Image: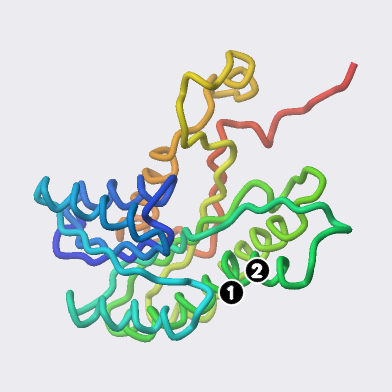
Amino acid sequence: MFQNKTVIVTGGANGIGRSIVQAFANAFANVVVADVDVDAGKTLEKQLLASGKHVFFVETDMRKEEEIRRLVEFTIQKYGGIDVLVNNVGISKFIPLFEMSVAEWDNILNTNLRSVFLCSKEAARFMKETGGSIINIASTRAFMSEPNTEGYAASKGGIIALTHALAASLSPYHIRVNSVSPGWIHTGDKSALSERDHKQHWSGRVGEPFDIARACLFLANPENDFINGENITVDGGMTKKMIYEE
C-alpha cells in the first residue's frame, strides 16, 4: 500500500515513534526518521536497512525552524516528495506549577506544539502538488489532567486545535490532517505492569506502541480520505470510564 511512498516521522527513534517508523517500513514505505537521539536513530536505521527496509535517519532538533527546513529539503532531494508526515515528537516533563519557569514552558510548547506547525507548513509546501496525509500525535491529556502537567496538557490540546485548523487550510490541496490521542501506552518492560493496571482499561490491557502505529497506518491510507480534521482516541476505553470514589 505504501510502496514508493515517502513518510517523515518526527521523534521516531524511540517509543511510539519507533513503532510508527517500523510499521511504515514494514508496509514498504521510504521512511525518514527525525530525532535528536543520534545513537538510537542510527541504530534503528541500521537495523531496518539490514532487513531490507528503506529508512534514513536525520538528526533534527524540532525546536529549530532551520533544522526542520533542512529535514524537509533533504527528504525531497532523496526521495522526490513527501506523502505522509507524522508529527510525533514530544517531551512529557511534569513540573510543579509554581516552580515552572517561562523557559521550561517554552521548551515544552516549542518541542510539542510549535514543531507541528512548522513541520506541517514546510512539508505541505511540497505536498500541495500531489496531496497527502498529516498525522499529529496528541494525547488524552488534552481532555483530562493530573496536577503539574500544565505545559504538556496545553501542548497536546493545542495540537488537536491545530489539527482541524490545518485540515481547513490544506483541504484545497487534498492534504488530510488528523490527530491520534494515545492513552496509557507502555513503552518499557511489560512485566512491570500489574493486573490492576490492565484492568483499568475496558480492553483489558495497557496500550502498546504498535496500537498507535496501526492507527497511523489507517489514517495515512488514501482509501480513508473521508476522515479529515478528526482526532481519534486510542486508549482502551479509559477516558470513557465513569469512576466513583468510595
**What's the residue at 48%, 71% (across, down)?**
62
Question: Which x, y percent locates residue 81?
Answer: 23, 77
**What's the residue at 17%, 74% (across, down)?**
79
Question: Which x, y percent locates residue 171?
Answer: 45, 77
Front one among 13 and 24: 13
User: Which of the 4 quarters of the picture holds residue 131?
Assistant: bottom left
- Badge 1 element: helix
User: Which of the 4 quarters of the picture holds residue 72?
Assistant: bottom left
For disc 2, the marked residue is 109
User: Which of the 4 quarters of the picture holds residue 173?
Assistant: bottom left
Question: Which x, y percent locates residue 87?
Answer: 46, 63
Residues under numbered marks 2 and 1 in contact, where contact means CB atoms less than 8 Å apart: yes
Front one among 103 and 139: 103
Q: In this view, does 212 lie above or below 128?
A: above
**What's the residue at 43%, 59% (across, down)?**
11
Question: Which x, y percent locates residue 56?
Answer: 22, 63
Q: Which amino acid does label 1 sit on?
A: Arg
Q: In this view, does 242 lie above or below 107?
A: above
Q: Is residue 128 above or below residue 217?
A: below
Q: What residue type is labelled 2?
A: Leu
Q: Earlier in the sequence, mark 2 or mark 1?
A: 2
Side of 173 where 105 appears, left or right: right
Residue ranking furthest to the front: 39
- Badge 2 element: helix
Side of 100 where 211 appears, left or right: left
For disc 1, the marked residue is 114
Q: Alpha-carbon distance for marks 2 and 1?
A: 6 Å
Neighbour class for label 2 at 10 Å: few (<14), some, many (≥20)? many
Colouring of the image: rainbow
Residue ranking furthest to the top: 195
